Amino acid sequence: MNTRLLPMNLKLVTLAFWLFAFPLVSLAVPASASSPDEIEGKAYRLERAYFVMVHVPAADVDKVMKSLVGAVGLEYGKFDQVAYIDARGLEQFRALAGSKAGAQSRATREPTRVVSFSLTHDTALLQKALDAVYAAHVYQEPVIYVNEVWRTRSTNPDESNPNRWWNQKPK
Protein backbone atom coordinates (compact mmCIF):
# COMPACT_ATOMS: atom_id res chain seq x y z
CA MET A 1 0.00 0.00 0.00
CA ASN A 2 1.29 3.45 -0.88
CA THR A 3 1.60 5.33 2.42
CA ARG A 4 1.99 8.68 0.65
CA LEU A 5 -1.62 8.44 -0.55
CA LEU A 6 -3.00 7.59 2.89
CA PRO A 7 -3.30 11.23 4.12
CA MET A 8 -5.03 12.18 0.83
CA ASN A 9 -7.45 9.24 1.08
CA LEU A 10 -8.25 10.17 4.66
CA LYS A 11 -9.01 13.75 3.58
CA LEU A 12 -11.29 12.53 0.80
CA VAL A 13 -13.15 10.18 3.14
CA THR A 14 -13.59 12.99 5.68
CA LEU A 15 -14.82 15.37 2.98
CA ALA A 16 -17.27 12.78 1.65
CA PHE A 17 -18.57 12.15 5.17
CA TRP A 18 -19.29 15.84 5.76
CA LEU A 19 -20.83 16.36 2.33
CA PHE A 20 -23.28 13.52 2.87
CA ALA A 21 -23.82 13.82 6.62
CA PHE A 22 -24.11 17.61 6.93
CA PRO A 23 -27.53 17.89 5.25
CA LEU A 24 -28.84 15.47 7.87
CA VAL A 25 -27.54 17.61 10.74
CA SER A 26 -29.32 20.83 11.60
CA LEU A 27 -27.53 23.52 13.54
CA ALA A 28 -30.67 25.63 13.76
CA VAL A 29 -33.56 25.55 16.19
CA PRO A 30 -35.73 22.50 15.55
CA ALA A 31 -38.42 23.15 12.98
CA SER A 32 -41.93 23.54 14.26
CA ALA A 33 -45.30 23.47 12.59
CA SER A 34 -46.04 27.07 13.59
CA SER A 35 -45.38 30.18 11.53
CA PRO A 36 -44.74 33.79 12.60
CA ASP A 37 -48.38 34.75 12.00
CA GLU A 38 -49.25 32.45 14.91
CA ILE A 39 -47.08 34.49 17.32
CA GLU A 40 -49.20 36.69 19.51
CA GLY A 41 -48.03 38.49 22.61
CA LYS A 42 -49.99 40.24 25.32
CA ALA A 43 -50.07 43.49 23.33
CA TYR A 44 -49.06 42.55 19.77
CA ARG A 45 -49.32 40.13 16.87
CA LEU A 46 -47.27 39.62 13.72
CA GLU A 47 -48.44 40.11 10.15
CA ARG A 48 -46.82 39.76 6.74
CA ALA A 49 -45.79 43.02 5.11
CA TYR A 50 -43.57 44.59 2.49
CA PHE A 51 -40.65 46.70 3.68
CA VAL A 52 -39.52 49.23 1.09
CA MET A 53 -36.34 51.33 1.12
CA VAL A 54 -35.81 54.08 -1.44
CA HIS A 55 -32.68 56.18 -2.01
CA VAL A 56 -33.88 59.75 -2.56
CA PRO A 57 -31.82 62.85 -3.30
CA ALA A 58 -31.97 64.90 -0.08
CA ALA A 59 -33.63 67.85 -1.84
CA ASP A 60 -36.48 65.64 -3.13
CA VAL A 61 -37.57 63.77 0.00
CA ASP A 62 -40.67 65.90 0.56
CA LYS A 63 -41.78 65.46 -3.06
CA VAL A 64 -41.43 61.66 -2.90
CA MET A 65 -43.15 61.51 0.50
CA LYS A 66 -46.06 63.61 -0.78
CA SER A 67 -46.46 61.28 -3.75
CA LEU A 68 -46.37 58.18 -1.51
CA VAL A 69 -48.80 59.55 1.05
CA GLY A 70 -51.19 60.61 -1.71
CA ALA A 71 -51.07 57.18 -3.33
CA VAL A 72 -51.05 54.76 -0.38
CA GLY A 73 -51.32 56.77 2.84
CA LEU A 74 -48.43 54.89 4.51
CA GLU A 75 -50.73 53.58 7.22
CA TYR A 76 -49.53 51.58 10.20
CA GLY A 77 -52.33 50.73 12.60
CA LYS A 78 -54.03 53.90 13.83
CA PHE A 79 -51.41 56.15 12.23
CA ASP A 80 -50.69 57.28 8.69
CA GLN A 81 -47.75 58.94 6.92
CA VAL A 82 -45.49 56.47 8.79
CA ALA A 83 -41.99 56.37 7.30
CA TYR A 84 -38.40 56.52 8.45
CA ILE A 85 -36.05 59.02 6.83
CA ASP A 86 -32.36 58.38 7.47
CA ALA A 87 -29.87 61.15 8.10
CA ARG A 88 -28.23 62.57 5.03
CA GLY A 89 -25.56 60.42 3.43
CA LEU A 90 -23.83 60.19 0.07
CA GLU A 91 -24.91 57.94 -2.76
CA GLN A 92 -22.26 57.18 -5.36
CA PHE A 93 -22.89 56.19 -8.97
CA ARG A 94 -21.41 56.45 -12.44
CA ALA A 95 -23.60 56.74 -15.51
CA LEU A 96 -22.95 54.15 -18.24
CA ALA A 97 -23.52 54.26 -21.98
CA GLY A 98 -27.23 54.21 -22.72
CA SER A 99 -28.18 56.29 -19.69
CA LYS A 100 -29.81 59.69 -20.17
CA ALA A 101 -26.62 61.31 -18.81
CA GLY A 102 -24.43 59.34 -21.22
CA ALA A 103 -21.29 57.48 -20.27
CA GLN A 104 -19.39 59.27 -17.52
CA SER A 105 -15.70 58.79 -16.86
CA ARG A 106 -15.96 59.51 -13.12
CA ALA A 107 -18.35 58.59 -10.36
CA THR A 108 -20.74 61.18 -8.94
CA ARG A 109 -21.71 61.60 -5.32
CA GLU A 110 -25.12 62.96 -4.42
CA PRO A 111 -26.44 63.95 -0.96
CA THR A 112 -29.10 61.31 -0.39
CA ARG A 113 -31.49 60.04 2.24
CA VAL A 114 -33.02 56.60 2.59
CA VAL A 115 -36.79 56.66 2.97
CA SER A 116 -38.18 53.40 4.34
CA PHE A 117 -41.73 52.32 5.04
CA SER A 118 -43.86 49.22 5.34
CA LEU A 119 -47.08 48.21 3.63
CA THR A 120 -49.57 45.47 4.29
CA HIS A 121 -48.76 42.38 2.25
CA ASP A 122 -50.85 43.39 -0.76
CA THR A 123 -49.23 43.43 -4.21
CA ALA A 124 -51.73 45.98 -5.57
CA LEU A 125 -50.80 48.37 -2.74
CA LEU A 126 -47.10 47.70 -3.33
CA GLN A 127 -47.51 48.52 -7.02
CA LYS A 128 -49.27 51.80 -6.18
CA ALA A 129 -46.39 52.74 -3.86
CA LEU A 130 -43.76 51.89 -6.48
CA ASP A 131 -45.70 53.82 -9.14
CA ALA A 132 -45.81 56.83 -6.78
CA VAL A 133 -42.04 56.67 -6.18
CA TYR A 134 -41.28 56.40 -9.90
CA ALA A 135 -43.65 59.31 -10.67
CA ALA A 136 -41.94 61.65 -8.19
CA HIS A 137 -38.31 60.48 -8.30
CA VAL A 138 -35.71 62.36 -10.38
CA TYR A 139 -33.45 59.38 -11.11
CA GLN A 140 -33.67 57.42 -14.33
CA GLU A 141 -33.10 54.27 -12.26
CA PRO A 142 -34.37 54.87 -8.70
CA VAL A 143 -32.69 52.61 -6.15
CA ILE A 144 -35.54 50.73 -4.47
CA TYR A 145 -35.35 47.61 -2.33
CA VAL A 146 -38.47 45.58 -1.53
CA ASN A 147 -38.42 42.86 1.11
CA GLU A 148 -41.14 40.54 2.35
CA VAL A 149 -41.09 40.77 6.14
CA TRP A 150 -43.08 40.24 9.30
CA ARG A 151 -44.06 43.34 11.26
CA THR A 152 -45.70 43.77 14.63
CA ARG A 153 -49.14 45.24 15.12
CA SER A 154 -50.60 46.38 18.40
CA THR A 155 -53.60 44.41 19.62
CA ASN A 156 -53.95 45.98 23.05
CA PRO A 157 -52.54 49.32 24.17
CA ASP A 158 -51.43 47.68 27.44
CA GLU A 159 -52.91 50.57 29.42
CA SER A 160 -51.05 49.82 32.65
CA ASN A 161 -47.55 49.65 31.15
CA PRO A 162 -45.54 52.41 32.89
CA ASN A 163 -43.34 52.83 29.79
CA ARG A 164 -46.22 54.08 27.62
CA TRP A 165 -46.04 57.82 27.01
CA TRP A 166 -49.49 58.41 28.45
CA ASN A 167 -48.45 56.84 31.77
CA GLN A 168 -45.33 58.96 32.18
CA LYS A 169 -45.14 62.02 34.40
CA PRO A 170 -44.06 65.24 32.69
CA LYS A 171 -40.40 66.05 33.26
Image (tube, rainbow, N blue to C red):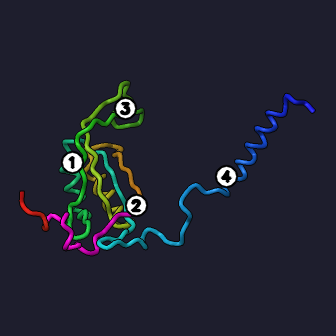
User: Tag 3 or tag 2, which sits nearer the N-term?
Assistant: 3
Q: Pointer 4: what residue?
A: 22
**Do the residues bearing badges 2 and 3 touch, measured as CB atoms within 8 Å?**
no
Residue at the spot x=28%, y=46% of the render?
114
Q: Position of residue 88 (x, y in %)?
A: 23, 40
Task: Report crowding for label 3: few under 14, some 14 to 19, many 20 or more residues within 10 A (C-alpha).
Answer: some
In the image, which disc is placed on residue 149?
2
Q: Pointer 1: what residue?
A: 61
Q: Amino acid at mark 1?
A: Val
Q: Nearer the viewer, mark 3 or mark 4?
A: 4
Q: Position of residue 144 (x, y in %)?
A: 36, 49
Answer whether residue 20 is magenta in the image.
no
- Give the alpha-carbon distance from disc 2 to disc 4, as whole Å: 29 Å
- Residue 47 image-quadrant placement: bottom left
Range drawn in magenta: 149-165
Dot 3 lies on which element? loop
Quadrant placement of the C terminus: bottom left
User: Tag 4 or tag 2, which sits nearer the N-term?
Assistant: 4
Q: Amino acid at mark 3?
A: Arg
Q: Nearer the viewer, mark 2 or mark 4?
A: 4
Q: Pointer 3: what residue?
A: 94
Name above or below for residue 86 compared with residue 162. Answer: above
User: Tag 2 or tag 1, which sits nearer the N-term?
Assistant: 1
Residue that extends furthest to the left in the rendered view of this protein: 170
Residue at the spot x=31%, y=60% of the render?
118
